[in-house]
Image (cartoon, coloured by chain):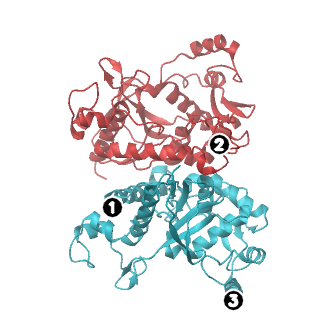
Chain colours: A red, B cyan
Amino acid sequence: MSEIRPVKIYNSLSGKKEVFEPLTPGRIGMYVCGPTVYNDVHLGNCRTFVSFDVIYRYLMHIGYKVRYVRNITDVGHLLDDGEDRMAKGARLDQLEPMEVAQKYTVGFHDIMRILNTLPPSIEPRATGHIPEQIEMVQAILDRGYAYAINGSVYFDVSKFAKENPSVYGRLSGRVIDELLAESRENLKNQDEKKHSADFAIWIKASEEHIMRWNSAWSVGFPGWHLECSAMSTKYLGKTFDIHGGGGDLKFPHHENEVAQNHGSCGCQPANYWMHANMLLLNGRKMSKSEGNTIAPTELFTGDSPFVTKGYSPMVVNFLC
Amino acid sequence: MSEIRPVKIYNSLSGKKEVFEPLTPGRIGMYVCGPTVYNDVHLGNCRTFVSFDVIYRYLMHIGYKVRYVRNITDVGHLLDDGEDRMAKGARLDQLEPMEVAQKYTVGFHDIMRILNTLPPSIEPRATGHIPEQIEMVQAILDRGYAYAINGSVYFDVSKFAKENPSVYGRLSGRVIDELLAESRENLKNQDEKKHSADFAIWIKASEEHIMRWNSAWSVGFPGWHLECSAMSTKYLGKTFDIHGGGGDLKFPHHENEVAQNHGSCGCQPANYWMHANMLLLNGRKMSKSEGNTIAPTELFTGDSPFVTKGYSPMVVNFLC
């Protein structure tokens, strides 16, 4: 194998630029948190994926063989509309979450293609990895970092943080004592959790929750953070090279991912964490909650209150 | 709801043209067997999907709300290459079937888009429905139509056929006594099956079989026919309107699907079965084993020994 030129990566885990060293010479395993497919993606989401597309292409260009895994989050939180379920007995009359997921997955792929990005090597779906997620919950329970109560299972953040003081909070810079102090504050109006810093890794499905699977604890569904831990392990191994995502995922999503991986196997998932900056619109992060999103097609056509003309997809790609 | 004009369907189950009656007024549930994504699709495969695209559009055009489910078969039979697995300890060095599946899924979607077909309403993957398949195996065992041996589970065709004489063989026109006579012939060099007409619904994974999941019977994988039974039930209900596929799937695939559905719930899966004719090239069915396949792109460019010029995708769509 010919020599691959050294490359420096800003590693969110250390807060420093580091010379990249792969686990296996000439190969890279990279996991990037993909879209949730219950809405159209907006330009801020796209920017993250365009950024990692550039990184993916660059790493291949300098000679690495890259396995790039980007998931599809299709375990949604669509609820039954509350109409009498007995009256709507026919399956075709019921809302089918996978029909919604398919619509927005197709839309997402269309936009990614128009932006001239490469498809990832593997694009695993959360609903397609329920057995793997259940096995990870069991592994965390077996190692004592989770507790089951009323059919749900929670990750025990204080116990994990106490026994692994250099792990929890390292990626996001959160101070665990502050998180736990908050917990005690909030615990008075609390539910089943021992601390409010704890998070669910398996959730018992309520009556109106449509997506549900059997498990040893309840008929339920996995916690939001779990899919990425289970799927990165399955396709890249317990420890792999690069984990990426939008900067807004650092906490709680990525911090909790690290806790789950470490909690199930005793090792760090990724050696390098890369975070794409958020897209700002007039100084504010573009997000649904800010109400300042631009859809990619609006930018291509110019049909948005925030832009005065359309731009070609390749210009948009370049500017990202 | 305004009146929908009557439509006649040639039903493979009865061998007759019948006036179509939906289970739920104004709605149709339709399942079509999709591609196996371990190879490029050829024009013969495409023709089936173009045919059902026309049917899908027509049924919507006359006023039906259609839930069109077309699966992706990604439980493949890729085997480890036999190199010392211990030596190839790193996950990234190992063949990853889902990487292969992703490549051909993307290729399939590209061709379907070029041929101007609509995506289905739901496109479920076999690997994404392992719990549902395991539950169906259990349901068939519970009803006495399967037996477990050495970690694998087989569907008991003779018992099922005896107790349900009007079901097995009806779709394909096979005579069960002939199938069972064959069985006795072949049984001398037989493996674990009681009859060679029996078929596996769960298979214990051998050492070199890469795709594998835990189950009550073994670490293994579902039989080939099972995914369609489990996924049609999940998204369309135990009995639904239309089941389609290429004519070459009638036996054994569709016959065994009917047996599995009926064996697990005691009811027919689909009321109407539609089969697309096979594409013939100079009088012979186009298939990989005949060595006479044309790839869609070859037909668009004209770069094939079987054609003298290229045709535009829309011409190809129309001629299908």
Which residue is the site of mark 2? A212
Q: Chain of mark 3?
A: B
- Give the mark, 1 or 3, whose residue is nearer the N terminus: 1
The image shows residue B77, relative to residue A278, as above or below, that is below
Q: Secondary structure at mark 2?
A: loop
Asked whether A6 or A178 is in front, the reply is: A178
Counting from the top left corner in percent of width and height, residue B246 is at 48, 71
Q: For the residue carrying disc 1, how many other residues have a C-alpha within 10 Å: few (<14), some (14-19), or many (20+)?
A: many
Residue B92 percent coordinates (x, y): 45, 50
Q: Mark 1 or mark 3: which is in front?
A: 1
Which quarter of the rendered picture does the C terminus of chain B lie within? Answer: bottom left
Dot 3 alpha-carbon crowd within 10 angstroms: few under 14, some 14 to 19, many 20 or more: few
- Residue hosting label 1: B115
Mark 1 touching mark 3, by CB under 8 A?
no
- The spot of residue A282 in percent (x, y) is 29, 18
Residue A41 appears in the rendering = yes
Task: Give the residue type that dot 3 points to.
Answer: Glu
Q: Chain of mark 1?
A: B
Name the chain letter of the residue that bears numbered label 2. Answer: A
Q: Is residue B163 above or below residue B282?
A: above
CA gap between label 1 and label 3 equals 47 Å
Amino acid residing under circle 2: Arg
